[in-house]
Image (cartoon, rainbow, N blue to C red):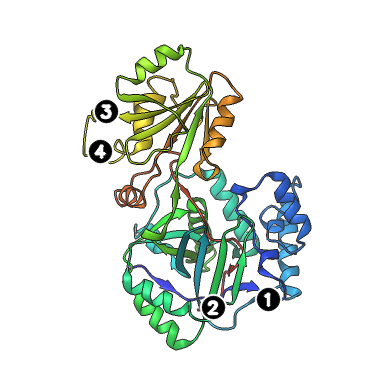
Amino acid sequence: MVSLKPFKGTRPFNEDAINIIAPSTDHLSEENIDLISNKNYWNYLKILNPVGQLKESETLLAAKNHFNEMKKNDVIKQDDRLSFYIYQISQGEHTQLGFLALANINDFLCHKIKGHENTQAKRMNERANQMTNIETQIGPIYMSYPDDNKINELLESFTSLVPDYDFESFDHSHHKLWCISNPKDIKMISKQLKSINSLYIADGHHRMEAMNIISQNYKKQKNNCDSFMIAAFPAEQTKIYDYNRVIKDLNGLSEGDFLEKLKENFKVTISDSSFKPKSKRQFGMYHHGKWYSLEFIGNFPDENDILSLLDINILNNYCLIPILGIKDINNDERIRFIAGCHGLTALENKVNDNDDSVAFSIFPSHIEEVMRVADNKLTMPPKSTWFDPKPLDGLVVYEFNQDN
């Protein structure tokens, strides 16, 4: 059982939520980030990235001052009562319904809360410094949990109520939030959530590690900060986009030689239109104005090797590394990663700008694959999952040191 509990969230009070929440910068250019920040004085972007190029100490001070100003002017306000927050996100035909709650760092340390990505020390420490500075977690860690009909039915029962927040975000995703503080409801939700035995980090691995750093630092000062805020959604409702690749050149090969080498492990077919894979072990490829479908026909050295069976590693191990010479998938300057939410046109545009380049469209990873990797304490290849839509930063924030 994972420990989950209600908390006193801090949320928009005398200002519309849309003016406060920080949109995912994945969808925005630096110009648009500046535009949103300048247009909406109270936006959390001023805290997450407050004043551009100031020195770190000045940047942290500016962030802290802005956060305190928000609270002083009742732009945001902490709830008086412990609450769970029922959270629905819709985008197009997709809808996911979950909840915000506090989880415990000990469940992460004993592998009840499981990740699937490697993290970088610099980004972890930056996140930790940012949150320690204001003693607050602005954005929840996005989690998935195994499907549970009873939890789904309970959460849906609250959606008949008028939501406390109901608005469209900058990326055109629609967000509704119900703040549940009635003690009987809290007790009922708490009881049902005890059926969750594991949580899987979808997005927010660096925040997770940052919260671990913060917890350890607090303990050194004989304080406690073992809780952190999550936004959890059932696995079946978690949407993962493909994460595609563009390679700068053919590693010195002619087009004909490149295609011949591919045919050793792939069935290569010219497509009369852009090709988006429809199943596992199928890939699209765009080069010199032409689309191809690639179907993997090679053999695996070990059919029980979880990682080698992933589509992204099929592409890595049978094309990008041996044929195109991409030795370091993480850091090679010849590779670019493009999220599937940008469409296949984004791949075509990149390749058309550089005549020798080649793009690959990949079938999206499935949440069950991600969970299996996490269960076995392994990590997915870099840039292999793109979770979207995501929970918003700043809709509900968690201030540390509250009595629960």
Does residue 60 sit above or below 242 in this rendering? below
Specify which label sits upstream in the sequence, 2 or 1.
1
Labels 3, 4: front one: 3
Give SS at disc 2.
strand
Give SS at disc 3.
loop
Kindly identify the amino acid type of the residue bearing the numbered disc 3.
Ile
Kindly identify the amino acid type of the residue bearing the numbered disc 1.
Phe
Specify which label sits upstream in the sequence, 2 or 4.
2
Residue 51 in the image: x percent, y percent? Answer: 76, 51
Task: Tell me the number on the disc at residue 179.
Answer: 2
Distance Cα–Cα, label 1 vs label 4: 51 Å
Labels 2, 3: front one: 3
Asked whether the beta carbons under mark 3 and mark 1 sit within 8 Å of each other, the answer is: no
Is there any visible trace of residue 56 in the rendered image? no
User: Mark 3 sits on what residue?
Assistant: 297
User: Mark 1 sits on what residue?
Assistant: 13
Near-viewer residue (15 or 345)? 345
Which residue is depicted at the point 58% across and 53% down? Answer: 127
Residue 29 in the image: x percent, y percent? Answer: 67, 44
Specify which label sits upstream in the sequence, 3 or 1.
1
User: Mark 4 sits on what residue?
Assistant: 305
Crowding at mark 1 (Cα within 10 Å: few <14, some 14-19, many 20+) = some
Does residue 397 sit above or below 119 in this rendering? below
Near-viewer residue (34 or 49)? 34
Which residue is depicted at the point 54% across and 78% down? Answer: 179
Kindly identify the amino acid type of the residue bearing the numbered disc 2.
Cys
Residue 65 in the image: x percent, y percent? Answer: 75, 63
